[in-house]
């Protein structure tokens, strides 16, 4: 379920855990420039390079804005094992809930 973690932030996370203030983004290796699997396009290389770098810059900006508001961004790459990624997200959400991530005011 895609949702905007913060009002006014024109970006959507793939999963949002409001009580833990965790936003999960499922990033494609090509589209988000995976350091392990991103390949450079042969056709229209400049266009695609600019497009991917723009996506990466937007991802960094999103992560920063969420962090400033007390949120944690989790980035899951498409090549990751789904069960391992789900376990990682679950552990982080549970830890943040236990620490009371929702008790601090949202900016």
Image (cartoon, helix red, strand yellow):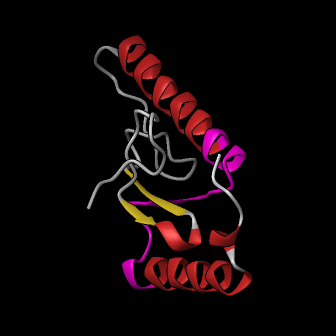
Count of picture labels: 0
Q: Which residues are magenta?
A: 64-83
Front in this rendered view, residue 44 or 67: 67
32 vs 25: above or below: above
Is-magenta flag for residue 77?
A: yes
Q: Residue drawn 61% across and 78% down? A: 92
Above/below status of 91 relative to 28: below
**Residue 7 percent location from the top left of the image:** 45, 41
The spot of residue 49 in percent (x, y) is 45, 21
Locate the C terminus and report the quarter of the image it occupies. top right
- Relative placement, left or right, of 8 versus 73 is left
Q: Residue at x 46, y 31 (%)?
A: 55
Q: Position of residue 65 (x, y in %)?
A: 63, 39
| Residue 57 inside the magenta-drawn segment | no
Q: Quadrant of the N terminus?
A: bottom left
Residue 66 position in % (x across, y down): 61, 47
Instruction: Tell me the quarter of the picture where residue 32 sits.
Output: top left
**Residue shown at 46%/17% (left/top)?**
50
Of the pair 34 and 25, the residue shown nearer to us = 25
Taking the image as shown, residue 12 lies to the left or right of residue 90, namely left
């Amino acid at each position: 379920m895609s949702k905007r973690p913060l009002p006014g932030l024109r970006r959507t996370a793939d999963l949002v855990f409001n009580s833990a203030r965790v936003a999960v983004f499922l990033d494609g290796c090509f589209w988000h420039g995976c350091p392990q699997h991103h390949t450079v396009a042969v056709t229209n290389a400049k266009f695609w390079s600019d497009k991917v770098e723009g996506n990466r810059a937007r991802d960094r900006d999103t992560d920063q804005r969420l962090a400033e508001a007390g949120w944690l961004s989790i980035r899951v790459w498409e090549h990751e094992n789904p069960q391992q990624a789900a376990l990682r997200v679950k552990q982080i959400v549970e830890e943040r809930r236990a620490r009371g991530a929702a008790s601090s005011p949202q900016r």
